Amino acid sequence: MECNKSKNLKKCNCSYEPCSRKGMCCECIRYHLQMQELPACCFPDDMEQTYDRSFRSFAQAVMSGKIQS
């Protein structure tokens, strides 16, 4: 499968500038799951910028309505 990095970058909301995985979703997801986190794209921009990408933070955001299904 070919990576669509340029297409992915258009929708990537990761604000961590030195990130080497931007636009490479499979690498990003693998990295964050190993860290017991979710990638930036799972969070609204204001939450993503806190860099708290924990499962707990995601669950709290869903329960509070900040993230809707």
Image (tube, grey):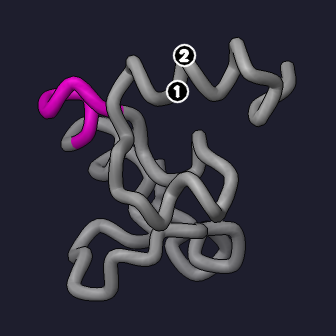
Tell me the kind of residue under disc 1.
Answer: Phe
Residue to which mark 2 is pinned:
59
Mark 2 surroundings: few (<14), some (14-19) or many (≥20) residues within 10 A:
few
Whether pointer 1 and pointer 2 mark residues with C-beta atoms closer than 8 Å, the reply is yes
- Quick check: is 4 in the magenta stretch? no
Q: Say which residue appears at 77% left-offset and 35% top-offset.
A: 66
Q: Which residues are magenta?
A: 32-37
Q: Say which residue appears at 63% left-offset and 62% top-offset.
A: 46
Q: Say which residue appears at 58% left-offset and 81% top-offset.
A: 6
Where disc 1 sits, the SS reads helix
Q: In the figure, is residue 41 to the left or right of 40? A: right
Image quarter for residue 35? top left
Residue 22 place in picture, x, y as percent: 39, 71
Residue 32 place in picture, x, y as percent: 26, 39
Mark 1 surroundings: few (<14), some (14-19) or many (≥20) residues within 10 A:
some
* Placement of 64 over or under 5, stated as above or below: above
Farthest residue to the left: give it: 34
Q: Which mark is residue 58?
A: 1
Front one among 65 and 44: 65
Tell me the kind of residue under disc 2.
Answer: Ala
Residue 50 place in picture, x, y as percent: 41, 59
Image quarter for residue 64? top right
Q: Distance from label 1 to label 2 (Cα)? A: 4 Å
Q: In the figure, is residue 23 to the left or right of 26? A: right
* Placement of 56 over or under 51, stated as above or below: above
Image quarter for residue 33? top left
Q: In the figure, is residue 51 to the left or right of 67? A: left
Where disc 2 sits, the SS reads helix
- Quick check: is 34 in the magenta stretch? yes
Q: Say which residue appears at 47% left-offset and 66% top-offset.
A: 49
Q: Quadrant of the C terminus?
A: top right
